[in-house]
Amino acid sequence: MTQQKPSWLPIGILLLIAIAAAFVPAPGAAVTEGINSGDTAWMLVSSGLVLLMTPGLAYFYGGMVNHKNVISTMLQSFIAMGVITIIWVVFGFSLAFGDSIGGYVGNPFTYAMFQGVFDGKPWALAPTIPFALFAFFQMKFAVITPALISGALAERINFRAFVLFMVLFCVIVYAPLAHWTWHPEGWLFKYGVLDFAGGTVVHMSAGWAALAGALYLKRRKSHIEASVLPPANIPYVLLGTGLLWFGWFGFNAGSAVGAGPLAVSAFATTHVAAAAAGLSWVLFDVTRGRKVSALGFCIGAVVGLVAITPASGFVSVTAAIFIGTVAAIVSNIAAHWRANSKLDDTLDVFPCHGVGGMMGMVMTGLFASKAVNSVVVDTEQGLFVTGDFALFIKHMVALAVVSGFAFGMSYLLLMVTDKIIPLRVTEEEERVGLDISQHDESLMEA
């Protein structure tokens, strides 16, 4: 096994946090007034479902890389569950949902160390569930977002550098976007942009960060030599897709923050869009003379889940068929273009999550209906519903601003990270594989 230079800084930071946490006073009595047990039960389940998506993503990505990088790729998702959880408790939740500073970011001290969370009044937009439950539900979204980015950087990124980038991304990109979009004082929220479960906050941010990472890290040696190894384990991809699809019901239907008709509608649109997109992807492949593949159906289904995310609580089930079908075709074209270019986005994160997320925001601007969700304003329903351009234009503005912010800030953070810890592994480490070179572990081939 190779020896790595010892570093006391990471454990030192965790120990300082642990010591500080030991002196945080216990919360007072939980607020029970207005709390609905049915809504609370559903949101507990939804929070668990959303967390399940991260191990699902690990299997989804792990099955698609080559056998030398399976463990490293999967660990990048699992480590997010540890790192982002601690950040969220210490100050991340405050940055996203604390007292607004100009509509751009929350005050990091509002709920520092979760003070005022367990004994706080329910969140204004989730009045029937405990505030702490809302905070933990949102935590799971923060966990999976940087894990999504890892797919674009797979097979060539230094693990320690990825962890540092993940921290910076969560603090400087994810938390402000969550504040803009989901905080009542956030500027995108007040502007009237509709994002039910994270088209901008999660998928567009991850997709654009993935593109920035692929450009910054440049191509793998195997990609340059056109000698990329085949996926390690397609059954892993199938398993990961099943876990993601299952968990996505919590992701989208849980964003109704209650067990009512809106949750049912979001649940239904989520499933239908995924089904339509999976079929659309493989059938579009058939038009190019390709065989129907398990990998194709899985990727298509995930694209459908991505695209329906911002729209899930605002559109009808029939609109979901259109959204899933069209989004899969557009993402398939983008992935095909990427495969024939010099862009080395290892697992097509930008074509699937970036493009899929943008398609979802466009489709929300086309199909959002007050009949589905009363939050939608009469004069700002989808373009295809009333013929009014107001909501559609707002979504195009949001798409442009979020894209520029997520890409630009992510690229800058990659540069900063690279100055502190080199982002790219050596050519020899890449050749051996990251499982061995980064973790001294390997997947034994059958």
Image (cartoon, rainbow, N blue to C red):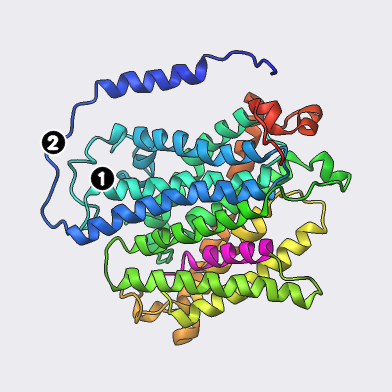
> Would residue 317 appear left or right of 211 to someone viewing this image?
left
Q: What is the number of the mark on residue 132?
A: 1
Q: Is residue 392 visible?
A: no
Query: Which stretch did the figure color magenta?
Result: 294-313
Q: Residue at x 73, y 45 (%)?
A: 215
Q: Nearer the viewer, residue 61 or 373?
A: 61
> Would residue 173 appear left or right of 134 to someone viewing this image?
right
The quadrant in which residue 422 appears is top right
Q: Secondary structure at mark 2?
A: loop
Above or below, 360 against 45 in this view is below
> Would residue 348 appear left or right of 223 to someone viewing this image?
left
Q: Secondary structure at mark 1?
A: helix
**Residue behind mark 2:** 28
Q: Residue at x 50, y 61 (%)?
A: 245
User: Residue 273 location, x and y as percent?
Assistant: 52, 72
Q: Residue at x 40, y 67 (%)?
A: 192
Structural crowding at the residue carrying mark 1, measured as other residues with C-alpha within 10 Å and reported as few (<14), some (14–19) or many (≥20): some
Q: Is residue 128 magenta?
A: no
Number of marks in picture: 2
Q: Is residue 248 visible?
A: yes
Amino acid type at image mark 1: Ala
Which residue is at the far bottom? 386
Which residue is at the far right? 225
> Would residue 307 appear left or right of 213 to someone viewing this image?
left
Give the alpha-carbon distance from disc 1 to disc 2, as whole Å. 13 Å
User: Residue 255 location, x and y as percent?
Assistant: 36, 61
Q: Is residue 299 magenta?
A: yes
User: Residue 56 location, x and y as percent?
Assistant: 52, 51
User: Residue 352 location, x and y as percent?
Assistant: 63, 60
